[in-house]
Image (cartoon, rainbow, N blue to C red):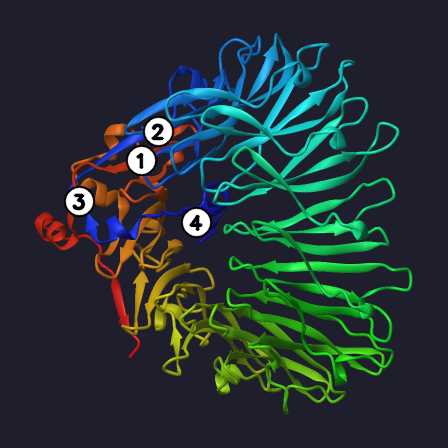
Amino acid sequence: MDTFSSLRRVTLALAILISSSTVLAELPERWEISRLGYYDSAHTSTTGRQYTSYTAMIDSGQVVGNSYRYSGTSITGYTTWIHDSGINTRIGLYGTGYVRDDGSQFSYIKYLATDGTASGTSNRYSGMESLGTSAWYYNGSTTVQAGFTDAVHTRSSDGYQNSTFIPYGANTTAAGHSTRYSASSVESGQTGWRVINDVTYRIGLYDAAYTTSSGYQSTTINGSNAAGQLVGTSEMSGTYSTMRGRSAWIANGAVTTRIGLIDAEHTDFYGVQNASFRGMSDSGFVIGYSDRIDGGQSGWVYNGSSTRRVGLTGSDFVSYSGSMETTISRLSESGYVAGSSYQHGTNWGNAAWVYNGVNTQKIGLYNGVHRSSVGTQYVNASELNERGDVIGTSSRYAGNSNNGVSAWIYTGGFTRQLGFTGTGYQRNDGYQYHYLDALNDNGQVVGASSRYSGADNIGLSAWFYDNGITTRLGLSGAAYTSDSGNQMSRVKDLNEQGQAVGFSNFYEGESFHGRSSWLYDHDSGEQRDIGLSGEDYTRNDGYHETYADQLNENGQVVGTTRRFVGDSVNSGEVSWLYDFELDETFEFNLSESDTGTADSDVMYFDESGLVLGRYALYDGATYMGARAFYFTIEDGLWDLGELLGLSGVDIADHGWESLASAIHSGDLGHILGYIDGYSYAGGQSMYLMTPAEVPVPATAWLLGSALVGLVGVKRKSNG
């Protein structure tokens, strides 16, 4: 256990991502394997160390990453590369101007887009002196310098230039900033830009209103979405050659459109406005803030054609000095917005609201115990779904003192209180506390309510809310109740099908004695205890500990259960999958030590039921390292190295000891991963498994290979 835990800390996380449309339905008859990156003398230390890492992989099987460069035992740079169709190609800017006199070269890969284009930066040098950073864009065949390099963006004293990329969405958008310089070589702002068809276009706002008398201009790109839209702000010029204010904008292609509120309420005496960006949806909605001349800020949403103010604006939300303050908390893809506005006057504190594309509606609980004796109310929106349902919390009061928190949902035009509020859920002074865990797009909510006995807190009860009905979740029998009545249940995840997974604690006397996990199905009303059980997973004093980690939309759950050998507390953790429809648990245990220790981790789990991860291999009492595994209910459980061996590929022929992990894959069935790094003097090397032939149906492949002796999956019925 200790050895495997150490490996977890020093190796990269394992995650094998294989498309369900190809790999799960059809398994290749034969594989080929390639080593990624560079491993020649320039990329090998005098001790034999080589180190390659990946940055991204796309579904078509292209991979980008970095390989360390060495001089003796010292790292002297990074080489960026793209692997495509079995070929490693160096990308980035290198050669004259990008090599220091001592031979150092540093390039960094920032992003790989879904069309196979990539972007990054390379350091600039003159002799041993750094001259900044150049941005570059790989268009699928060549590397093109990006950003601006004219006189305005070059320091005249020494030729220094600095262009950098920003992170962007899954599209072909390459965008960034280039630093501007004055004639006296002083930084004078930055220019925003994006690359379209290998050409760098300027974006942002930069006319006279955004330029000081000294020529200072500054644009900042704040974000992007999957549609390739960019949002950001540009500073506005003011008096005395200074910048005052900021305008928000959205860029579609090379066209920049100003957004935000620009009326008199949001404009000062000098005509300056100040806007900021809060968030953006993939559907093109943008949310942000505009400062008010009388103090505070207004919230707004840009809907693709115009900017609309959101938040509460009546007299109750204006201070004696005229200040108003709105905060936006959530934006949906369908354009709903939720947040809170600060109240003044008879009532003060936060009031929650939701904007439906036309109107802003005040929501939440305000009356009775949710208002203090001096009028304090704090109501906040927590989550928002695609149909405009909102969940949130309202502070509770006893006189002028805080007395807990209530939970609520706004749906169908009404606010309803959530959770348990009767006997056992209220302290003897009336205190209650409720937690919200998740909201799905059907308006179903899961959460928990604090339990009390007199003045004492005795745990949490989990619950599921649907259409006015609250159902208690979790296990609550004698084994799950302490001597003083403490019970602890909490929801871990909720899917769109109305299924929830969570945990309940075991007790022995007053002491924690383990944990069970369960799956609740709202349609059937069933709740099932899930995970691994039996003597291998129960300590001799009855202690048992299971954790459910992820739930997919098909009612499948993955998790881990601790192993015990007698009274041992160090026998590992084994992962598993539970399928609600089959009511079966599948154990991922491929190797045990001679003392019964076993370890496995689920590192990837998708909607098709594909599970991928790693396990600890033992030979007797000796830990032999980590190995990758693959599982589906249809295909069973496989060691990935053995799967490759069936194709006649012996990884020892490449000088590799094992396939230590796998990281990613795509629609064509490629599998990317790491080999055993200890083969390379403490370094790290990568491989790509590629289907060598058109895949055949999995059943035929299994039968044709006569796979006798491979480890199968352990199947346990929960029925």
Q: Is tag 2's residue or tag 4's residue first in the polypeptide sequence?
A: 4
Mark 2 → mark 3, Cα distance in angstroms:
22 Å
Secondary structure beneath disc 2? strand
Question: Residue 4 bears which disc, if any?
Answer: 4
Q: Which residue is mark 1?
A: 688
Question: Residue 83 bears which disc, if any?
Answer: 2
Report the side of 642 relative to 338 (left or right). left
Q: Residues within 10 Å of mark 3 (few under 14, many from 20)?
A: some
Instruction: Give the foreground label among 4 and 1.
Output: 1
Q: Residue at x 81, y 55 (%)?
A: 296
Q: Is residue 156 above or below residue 377?
A: above
Residue 473 x/y as whole percent: 49, 80
The amino acid pointed to by label 4 is Phe
Q: Quadrant of residue 194?
A: top right
Question: Residue 508 bears which disc, if any?
Answer: none
Residue ranking furthest to the bottom: 423
Q: Is residue 492 above or below residue 53?
A: below
Q: Is residue 8 above or below residue 550?
A: above
Mark 4 → mark 1, Cα distance in angstroms:
24 Å
The amino acid pointed to by label 1 is Leu
Q: Is residue 540 above or below residue 20?
A: below
Instruction: Give the foreground label among 2 and 4.
Output: 2
Mark 4 → mark 3, Cα distance in angstroms:
35 Å
Residue 17 x/y as whole percent: 35, 48
Instruction: Give the foreground label among 1 and 3.
Output: 3
Q: Which residue is mark 3?
A: 695
Note whether residue 36 is visible. no
Q: Residue at x 74, y 47 (%)?
A: 262
Q: Residues within 10 Å of mark 1 (few under 14, many from 20)?
A: many
